[in-house]
Amino acid sequence: MSIDMKQFHSVFFDESQEHLDEMEHLLLELDTENPDAEELNSIFRAAHSIKGGSGIFGFDALGSVTHIMESLLDSVRQGKLIINLAMVDLFLCSVDVLKGILDSYKSGSEIDWPSANKICERLEAVTQRKETVVEPKLEGFGFLNESAIEVEDGFGFFGDPIAPSQEEAYGFFDDKESAKAPKASKKTSAKKAVTEAPAVVHELEPVVSAAAPIEEPISKPYIADTTTNQSNLTAKPKVAESAASENSSIRVDVTKVDQLINLVGEIVITQSMLNLIGQSIDGSLGEKFQSVAAELERNTREIQEAVMSIRMLPVSFVFNRFPRVVRDLSAKLGKHIDLIIEGGDTELDKGLTEKLVDPLTHLVRNSIDHGIESAEVRANRNKNPTGTVILKAAQQGGNILIEISDDGGGLNREKILAKAREKNIPVNDNPSDAEVWQLIFAPGFSTADQVTDVSGRGVGLDVVKRNVQSLGGRIDIDSREGKGATFTIRLPLTLAIVDGMCVSVSDQTFIIPLVNIVESMQPHEKDIKTLAADDQLLLVRDQYWPILPLYTAMQLEPQFTKAHQGIVVLIEANKKRFALFVDALVGQQQVVIKSLEQHYKRVQGVAGATIMGDGSVALILDVESLAADLRSSH
């Protein structure tokens, strides 16, 4: 019976991507002066696993590159060759090529064979140099080398003979050791990987390579026989740990998780309906019903929390790609930079982690290019020649805070104001520092003296702000000239649920996200000032808040038309404050967000909808949109 191997492609692609990410992380973390044996073994196992699966599926390009890469890694972990920064650079380049090849196989596009062949030649050159100097009797492991073919068998992932002490996993279904989450970054090794300018890689290029020129794709990836050469760095078997790892996780399509979340949301709504029905039942039957309903409510809440936690991922999934970004960019700009990552285990909704990559990349690159000064300038300012960028995440109530801070020169207030006037960007008289810092998010704004391929064109930060706002968050800046700057992104923990305050206008109920609420009150008539065109301001502790009647924004007939007769909710939306005038407060509630745009259409001022316990629909307000309408009307 033939097996359709295509059904396993998606699993192989996912696990190969995880292996490549792990290899990159470990290479950046590796201390070349004192390499950790287990880290070298993990890098080797990741390459070996990709090669094994590639052979099974006939992915020749992946197998060819990983075969030679594995041979070089095996020599390093056996102590036959000493790893250095130049070699780390070469391995990182190999990882980049492998990622490109993997993407090509995923999309079915043409393989970039010239890049694959070039990286193979460079890896082969280092391997040949090692064997010539250390073990002159051995031939090179060229993947066109016939002597290698004679001693190699294609190890599949269906149970290959291997010495138990070597602890190799040849298949993508078996290799649980290498699929573990990367270790937490160590500051000492991070410095080695990030701050030191990478050595010149072209020193590894051979004058004459013993391998035959690579003319065409290889029909079969070769696998080195490592059973006869036991590595002195290989860890001992961990049977119990491997078994535990095998049973500790399962790969599930995210659409199934979303469907489960939607169903739990429906259960929450149904449970609320039962509570309302139970209030109308009297006597002993009513008491029994209330007792059962309370137990159901408790269980439903636990189910909801458990299901929501499935979508939560450590923010390290995003953070772990930045050591490479910092390393490459600092080398390109000739700067020495330490990257410190804190709070990587803080969990965030998967939908948010995917959309955070671009904003964080812009901000980190901005800190390196604009924030951190050159080593000479820092020395003249009595600062450590090595700059520091800190990437930090922390949970605060129902929000997550992500900070990108640096110890560079900070923002220049006068330079920003001058550039804003030059570009005719409206600026208030005597603006506060916070207002000045927000000017850098204006489209086309840049204070760079010259345009480079890194920055200076005035694009990036405006996109960052839009992306953060689209996630229901906001971004703030704190800066001290000469001391550095901190960009703080505040986001909701999840896009699926929201903690909100229920308010009413006429017979309609609306939800205001708690993250945007400062406080609520019934104002005194004397604190309300009327301006031209009937605009009103509310005086609260020596500050004036513009009043926005919600009935006007939603085109409803209100119960009250004067603000002092109803309730005002003080709202803060991206540093724009206003007082939202409503009829009454209904109560605080956690609600499941339903997309109104998906099922109906985009409604101005509305972010989504939810179903209340009585079956009615309540609209969730988009406070950013309401704030924009308020500014445009003034």
Image (cartoon, rainbow, N blue to C red):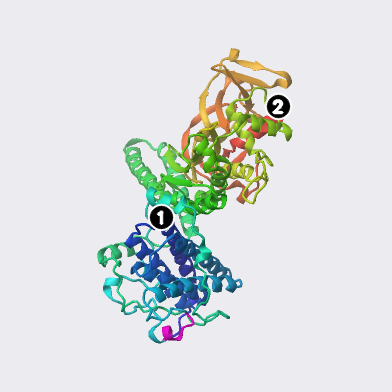
Q: Where does residue 15 sit, x and y in percent of width and height?
A: 44, 65
**In the image, residue 453 above or below residue 613:** below
The residue to which callout 1 is attached is 29
Q: Where does residue 168 sit, x and y in percent of width and height?
A: 33, 71
Q: Earlier in the sequence, mark 2 or mark 1?
A: 1
Is 192 on the left or on the right of 37, as rendered?
A: right
Residue at point 71%, 33% (across, down) = 425
Three-letter code, disc 1: Glu
Image quadrant occupied by the N terminus: bottom left
Q: Is residue 132 magenta?
A: no
Which stretch did the figure color magenta?
143-149
Circles 2 and 1: CB atoms closer than 8 Å:
no
Of 302 and 44, nearer the camera is 44
Of 621 and 464, nearer the camera is 464
Q: Is residue 145 magenta?
A: yes
Q: Where does residue 7 sit, x and y in percent of width and height?
A: 48, 73
The residue to which callout 2 is attached is 634
Three-letter code, disc 2: His
